[in-house]
Amino acid sequence: MATSAPASYTFGGEPLTADRARRMRWTATGLLGAMAVMFFTTHGLVGTHPAWGYVNAFAEAAMVGGLADWFAVTALFRHPLGIPIPHTAIIPENKDRIADTMAQFLRENFLTPAVVARRMAGMNIAKAVGEFLTAPPLPVQDGDGPSRLTGGVSELLAEVLESLDPDRLGNQVRAGLGNQFAKIDVSPLLGRMLEGAIADGRHMPLMDGFIRWAGLTLEDNEDAIRDIIESRANAVMRWTGLDERISTSVLDGLYKLLAEVLVDPEHPIRSKIEEGLEKLASDLQHDPKTRERVEAMKRDLIENPAVAEWWMGVWERIRQSLIRRARDPENALGEEMRKLLKEMGGALQQDQRLQLQVNRLARRTMVGVATRYGGQIVQLVSETVRRWDAVTITGRIESAVGRDLQFIRINGTIVGGLVGMTLHFIVGWM
């Protein structure tokens, strides 16, 4: 029986090839030929000794059994001796029906939601994924699983960031962040933060900084303040020079006041400022008008075109930085991803609740895939087999199971011979 080009298969670590099937076919054919030679050789010796009768009966029945099995095996793949006998060349003649039958068998026994759910119920996919992610990396030339996964994720991230419209993606990210920020009631949050800062004394450095800033501002604008005071004075005061002395006294008083407030933690003005901050913290949390003003400021900030323009610049820098880091093998991004994947793998291995959730999600996903796309999958199988020509499908099936079929021929030859010898024994004693 001719076969297609040798193709390798692997089962249990042992390579199964078309060459081995061919060698087994020649073995079965050689055994059949040996039985034929034995039959014709011993046919003239039957009457000389009873043992030759048994040998001849064995050879005759073995030859018949071997020929019958040869015909049966050959009829699966082609016409025996090229003669178009009905119901031979079964696989080539019925490949379309075989394709439909295979697809239907796959659909009914593997891709039904109940079967998928039952099969996946006993699988701990989360733990298996965790073990893969935490496995020590192999040398790159041997197939570095985690490292290659990290490289693939990095390259995929870079490709996604490059392929998508940066402006559209940036606007989508900004809109998403804006929507989330709009849902946050920032006024009570600010009030609690301010209240906590006052309680812990964290507002004191801020107050000192404000006082220093007020002093520096006063110093930088001293001439302008003098002009304002002197412009308010009347002509008599300007004629007597009192306006200058008044402005100097006012400035000196302000400098002295700021210095006293800065060095005296118990200064009354500090107490007044703290009271004002405490009231502001309370109003941010409880006063509806204050909260509404803060929310209005937040909405104005979100809708401000200047903020949108600022964000687009920030987003573009982030995008370009991520692309460079993903493409740079010496960058820390790969190491960060490896650490992240390893931590994720450890959590999948140790956290029973996380395993339950992941396994449940995987099971529901596969059941959904089987429900929605099961028909398309089996249609793909059916159409693929239908597109194979008769030589291809015959060669592939014969290369896969041909060796086992030749064992059928060998067994048929031996069993037939034993049956023939047994019948010869029974007939001889009747």
Image: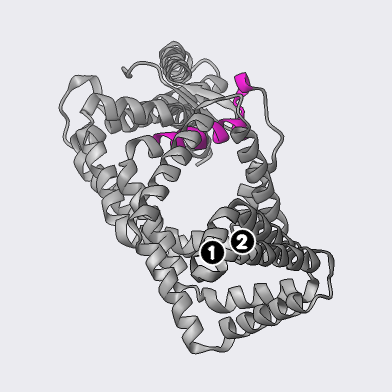
From where the camera sits, is residue 342 visible?
Answer: yes
Magenta residue span: 140-159
Residue at x 22% of width, y 41% of height: 383
Task: Residue 418 in the image: state x and y as whole percent.
Answer: 52, 32
Residue at x 28% of width, y 30% of height: 393
Measure how far apart labels 1 and 2 are at the Cα level. 7 Å
Residue type, numbered disc 2: Glu
Badge 2 element: helix
156 within the magenta span: yes
The secondary structure that dominates the magenta segment is: helix
Task: Residue 132 in the image: state x and y as whole percent.
Answer: 64, 42
Image quadrant holding the N terminus, namely: top left
> Based on the displayed image, in which of its 4 quarters is residue 352 positioned?
bottom right
Task: Between residue 65 and residue 285, name the one nearer to us.
Answer: 285
Instruction: Give the residue number, with chain letter if any, for mark 1.
Output: 230
Residue at x 56% of width, y 30% of height: 148
> Based on the displayed image, in which of its 4 quarters is residue 396 positioned?
top left
Instruction: Give the residue number, with chain letter if any, for mark 2.
Output: 244
Q: Are there few (<14), some (14-19), or many (20+) residues within 10 Å of tag 2?
A: some
The correct choice, above or below, for 102 with respect to 40 in the image is below
Task: Residue 20 in the image: state x and y as whole percent.
Answer: 48, 18
Q: Are there few (<14), some (14-19), or many (20+) residues within 10 Å of tag 1?
A: many
> Based on the displayed image, in which of its 4 quarters is residue 40 positioned?
top left
